[in-house]
Amino acid sequence: CSLLYLSQGSDTIVDLDGTILEKPVDENDAHAMLTKLSGNWHKVHTGVAIYGLGVPATATSDYQQPSLLTSFTATARVKFANLTPDDIKSYVNTGEPMDKAGSYGIQGVGGQLVEMIEGDYFCVMGLPMHRLSRELSRTITLLEAKSK
């Protein structure tokens, strides 16, 4: 196909024993979440959706454009270190937790809070790159085949 349009979106949540921890509403909420995570294992789920649209060079105005929507979810397990109240207060004071699911960003200062991870680091970061690259490649291949 001559033109290929792709759009991707993703979002991440933290799951602590079945309780979903989204982005904190304020510093007190961030402090409470981090206190709950301290010393515990939790899961991080990142959902990804890809929309693709392919248009061949010879398309006319009445051409039905092939499109493809695919999605997947990646999950990793994370264990937090045992945090002191001062550890939590210091981290919350950085401001970093305020726009992060579960009140931490593994790719920033929050990485110091993590003792262990099982699974894809990039899933915890919010975009599972290996799986995304495979799905993008598959989407492109399918759209090119449909657009011929």
Image (spheres, rainbow, N blue to C red):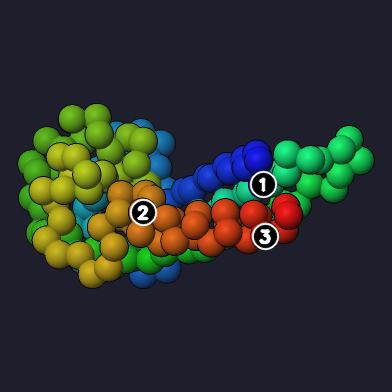
Please tell me whether mark 3 sits on a helix, a strand or a loop.
helix
* Residue bearing the label numbered 1: 1
| Amino acid type, label 2 | Met
Q: Residue at x 27, y 68 (%)?
A: 119
**Which one is in front in this view, the residue at disc 2 or the one at disc 1?**
1
* Above or below, 33 relative to 27: below
- Give the crowd class for mark 3: few <14, some 14-19, many >=20 residues within 10 Å: few
Q: Return the x and y of residue 109 as percentages of the image width and height.
A: 15, 40
The reply, left or right, for residue 17 in relation to residue 147 is left
Comes first in the chain, label 3 or label 2: 2
Residues under numbered marks 3 and 2 in contact, where contact means CB atoms less than 8 Å apart: no
Q: Return the x and y of residue 130 as percentages of the image width and height.
A: 35, 59
Quarter of the picture containing the C terminus is: bottom right
Q: Which mark is residue 145?
A: 3
To which quarter of the image does residue 98 belong?
Answer: top left
* Above or below, 96 relative to 56: above
| Amino acid type, label 1 | Cys
